[in-house]
């Protein structure tokens, strides 16, 4: 499986190229690197899925969950970089302070991409922690890219929460390593799963709590969700898409790794109950915070917290719930990154992130307003989009797992969320036109690099919603599900 380390080598070559050769075109170098990575890996990843695991020299290793996270990372990483080529060109025109910083932006984005790709590739527990921690350190520079008072405040809050989470996750990792029997020297996740039955339950429970708190903070689970609206609203829109669509998944991957060890060690119910409670609390807080938002980037950020809560609920409920969790993860990544891409278009065209300033946008600019409304309905869980299917599976798993009270609560919260997003979408699309919309009448250039990511994302989300039920039916008929 020599191609696995190439997933890191290719972006590393791009980073070194931008550092050594000033004449390189930074936007297209970054787009080429991420695109080449996606094309190189796509066929191999699909072929590997049937085998369940791929490895190289015992250092790089992909299991099923890691493969899934890698696929999302490669795809969203490419579309975010491709969209950035148009975004930064417009940013330099609209914001003179950003002139001359395009090269720096694409260098930073490749470094961030490099750390994200590395998270699921390593089997060593310390390297997993190191790369998850590196994603935070690499992205904080991008959160503060515009260098305003708001970005400085957001980046410091972001960094403090990330480092707190990193320390907790490190203590949990070290506890797993030092709580092993005397004769054991396990240093990989697979080895830890094998010796987990010989580790005391108290040590496993404490290690899982530390891992859940640490990586949960990086995932945006309650009560550590409050960094999300600040970081997402202040970062450049393509970076907000990567933070929401990729980084949160990579952090949650750390939780799943800890859970696999806890399950193998016999503390299944403790770990799953803890994740379930945290997931429900996150959905509750996320939905309540979305009701009274006025800034659409902060709205999308709280929606990210809510979706990660749903993912946590899914993975706490056994195989059926895990299926819903996987589907929720990929649908959220596709839709939310698309929403942040679209928010970048609207911000550059109107100069505001206040939803009151976007009322009536569907009449003034049908493409921008129509696509935004479509994406907002998709993230709200409206059929026939894929998120409707994943949320339906997770709610079903809640009722099926003998926790109907929580099932009713989550269902009510999802109804409130849908009603809220529907109200926002109608106000933005067909409300009374705002004075800010005069800027829409100015010449605003669009590019295929901004249109293609949205088109591909929405097509995939629709495909998941329309085709997945037939796929599940076929699997059931073959007694495979």
Image (spheres, grey):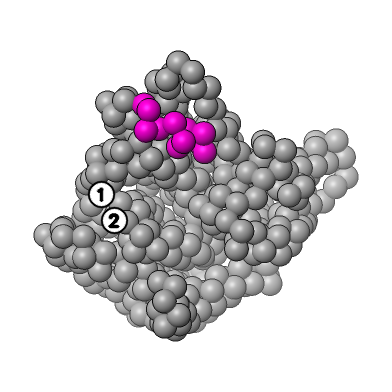
**Magenta span contains residue 195:** yes
Viewer-closest of 15 and 272: 272
Q: Secondary structure at mark 1?
A: helix
The residue at which mark 2 appears reads as 317
Q: Main secondary structure of the magenta part?
A: helix
Residue 335 makes an appearance in the image: yes
Q: Look at 45% across and 16% down and name the residue there.
A: 182
Q: Which mark is residue 151?
A: none
Residue 89 position, x and y percent, is: 69, 57
| SS class, disc 2 | loop
478 on left or right of 416: right
Rendering coords of residue 192 (x, y %): 47, 32
Q: Residue at x 50, y 45 (%)?
A: 250
Along the line of sight, the residue nearer the viewer: 375 or 403: 403
The vertical placement of 388 against 148, above or below, is: below
Question: Closer to us: mark 1 or mark 2?
Answer: 2
At x 65% / y 59%, what residue is drawn? 48
- Note whether 418 is above or below 253 in the view shown: below
Looking at the rendering, the stretch of residues picked out in magenta corresponds to 189-199
The answer to which of marks 1 and 2 sits earlier in the sequence is 1
Residue placed under numbered mark 1 in the picture: 276
Residue 7 in the magenta stretch? The answer is no
Residue at (52, 38) in percent of width and height: 190
Looking at the figure, which quarter contains the C terminus?
Answer: bottom left
- Compare residues 369 and 311 and report the one nearer the observer: 311
Instruction: Return the residue nearer the eye: 461 or 80.
Output: 461
């Amino acid at each position: 499986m020599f191609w696995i380390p190439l997933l890191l080598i290719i972006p590393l070559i791009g980073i070194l190229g931008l550092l050594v050769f000033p004449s390189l075109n930074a936007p297209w170098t970054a787009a080429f690197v991420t695109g080449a990575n996606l094309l190189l890996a796509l066929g191999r990843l699909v072929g590997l899925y049937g085998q369940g695991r791929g490895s190289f020299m015992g250092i790089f290793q992909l299991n099923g969950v890691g493969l899934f996270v890698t696929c999302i990372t490669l795809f969203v990483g490419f579309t975010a970089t491709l969209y950035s080529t148009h975004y930064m060109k417009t940013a330099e025109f609209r914001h003179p302070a950003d002139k001359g910083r395009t090269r720096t932006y694409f260098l930073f984005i490749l470094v961030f991409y490099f750390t994200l790709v590395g998270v699921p590739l390593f089997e060593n527990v310390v390297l997993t922690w190191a790369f998850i921690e590196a994603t935070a350190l690499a992205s904080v520079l991008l959160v503060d890219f515009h260098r305003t008072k708001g970005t400085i405040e957001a980046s410091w809050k972001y960094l403090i929460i990330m480092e707190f989470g990193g320390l907790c996750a490190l203590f949990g990792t070290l506890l797993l390593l030092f709580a092993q029997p005397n004769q054991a020297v396990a240093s990989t996740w697979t080895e830890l799963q094998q010796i987990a039955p010989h580790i005391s339950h108290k040590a496993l429970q404490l290690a899982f709590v530390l891992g859940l708190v640490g990586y949960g903070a990086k995932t945006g689970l309650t009560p550590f969700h409050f960094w999300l609206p600040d970081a997402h609203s202040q970062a450049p829109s393509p970076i907000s898409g990567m933070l929401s669509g990729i980084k949160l998944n990579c952090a949650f991957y750390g939780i799943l790794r800890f859970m696999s060890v806890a399950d193998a060690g016999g503390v299944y119910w403790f770990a799953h109950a803890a994740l379930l409670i945290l997931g429900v609390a996150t959905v509750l807080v996320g939905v309540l915070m979305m009701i009274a938002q006025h800034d659409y980037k902060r709205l999308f950020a709280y929606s990210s917290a809510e979706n990660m809560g749903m993912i946590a609920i899914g993975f706490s409920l056994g195989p059926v719930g895990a299926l819903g969790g996987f589907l929720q993860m990929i649908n959220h990544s596709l839709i939310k990154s698309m929403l942040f891409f679209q928010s970048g278009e609207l911000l550059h065209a109107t100069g505001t992130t206040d939803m009151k300033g976007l009322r009536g946008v569907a009449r003034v600019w049908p493409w921008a307003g129509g696509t935004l409304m479509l994406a907002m309905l998709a993230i709200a869980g409206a059929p026939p989009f894929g998120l409707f299917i994943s949320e339906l599976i997770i709610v079903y798993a809640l009722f099926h797992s003998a926790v109907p009270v929580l099932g009713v609560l989550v269902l009510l919260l999802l109804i409130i969320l849908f009603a809220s997003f529907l109200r926002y979408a109608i106000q933005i699309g067909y409300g009374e036109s705002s004075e800010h919309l005069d800027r829409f009448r100015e010449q605003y250039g669009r590019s295929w690099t901004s249109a293609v990511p949205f088109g591909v994302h929405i097509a995939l989300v629709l495909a998941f919603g329309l085709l997945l039920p037939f796929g599940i039916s076929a699997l059931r008929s073959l007694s495979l599900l």
